[in-house]
Amino acid sequence: MPATSRRRPATRKGRPVLTRESIAAKALEMAGARGFASLTMRALAAELGVTVRALYNYVEDRQDVVHLAVDTLLTSWNPPPLHAATWETSVADYAGSLRALYRRWPRALLVSLEEDTPPASVHPNRLLNLDRFLRLLRDVGLEVPAALAAHRHLSLLVLSFVLMVDGPADRAGDGGGGDDRDEEGRGEGGRGGLVPDAWLAGHADLDIPTLREAAALPLPTPDEQFAELVSAVVDRIRGDLRAG
């Protein structure tokens, strides 16, 4: 936390200036778009239209900024209530909440790879929401190890889906699904198919008939693909329940 002796002007000519909240929001926006590696104090100050010195009236250092950004990210993660009686819907709702969170700030998800985040800085939501999901699966009959494996499976699938499907589709303006094509052809930028048409055209001599047939099929939208992902997780849980 910043030292209490530091000066923190709240207004300039009657208008709000910086706050820790506004710094956190801008830092998270930057990290979400370009990753935490892009988040320097100089770049953050430039984005906010202030000097680096002004930032230090509100934060201790860059690590304090990273902590604020991650705290803001996880504060916004509030999955809907989970009910054992309708556990399939609850699993889908939980997955949807993860997808929405990750999709809003996709590159910020890599914070554990790019930053040193000590255990004491972990936001309570990261623990509380995991506990809620594990209790849901335990209440419907899974043992805790199987419930944890299901959560791990779901989390990895959603993370990779947002980075590899939603992220490129959102940047291309096709995040709502649809069947648009760009100049490079089907699948470019993660917008659907297996490979871009341009790749296939550039290797017209390759004997890949099955791939060419697959690439010509209608493309599922990101939402349709995500529904398939959730269904696969639910089917896995059903299988674990039967085996148990």
Image (cartoon, helix red, strand yellow):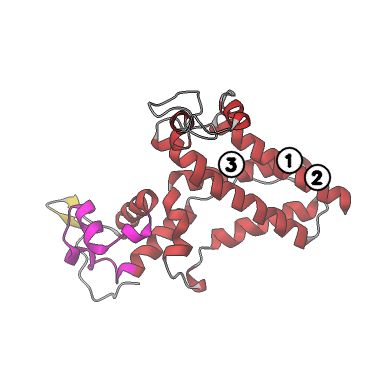
Q: Earlier in the sequence, mark 3 or mark 2?
A: 3
Question: Which quadrant of the figure contains the C terminus?
Answer: bottom right
Q: Is residue 6 above or below residue 153?
A: below
What amino acid is labelled 1 in the image? Glu
Badge 3: how crowded within 10 Å, few (<14), some, or many (20+)? some
- Residue found at x 16% / y 61%: 51
Q: Nearer the viewer, residue 48 or 197?
A: 197
Left or right, 25 with reference to 195: left
Q: Is residue 179 magenta?
A: no
Q: Is residue 69 above or below residue 91?
A: below
Left or right, 167 with reference to 213: left
Q: Earlier in the sequence, mark 1 or mark 2?
A: 1
Tell me the CA gap for discs 3 and 1: 12 Å
Query: As drawn, which residue projects farthest toward the front?
Result: 205
What amino acid is labelled 3 in the image? Gly
Magenta residues, start to end:
35-62
Per the image, the residue denoted by label 1 is: 88
Whole-percent x and y of residue 152?
65, 56
Query: As drawn, which residue projects farthest toward the left?
Result: 13
Say whether residue 215 is visible.
yes
Q: Is residue 37 magenta?
A: yes
- Residue found at x 49% / y 29%: 204
Per the image, the residue denoted by label 3 is: 96
Per the image, the residue denoted by label 2 is: 238
Badge 1: how crowded within 10 Å, few (<14), some, or many (20+)? many
Tell me the CA gap for discs 3 and 2: 19 Å
Whole-percent x and y of residue 93?
63, 41
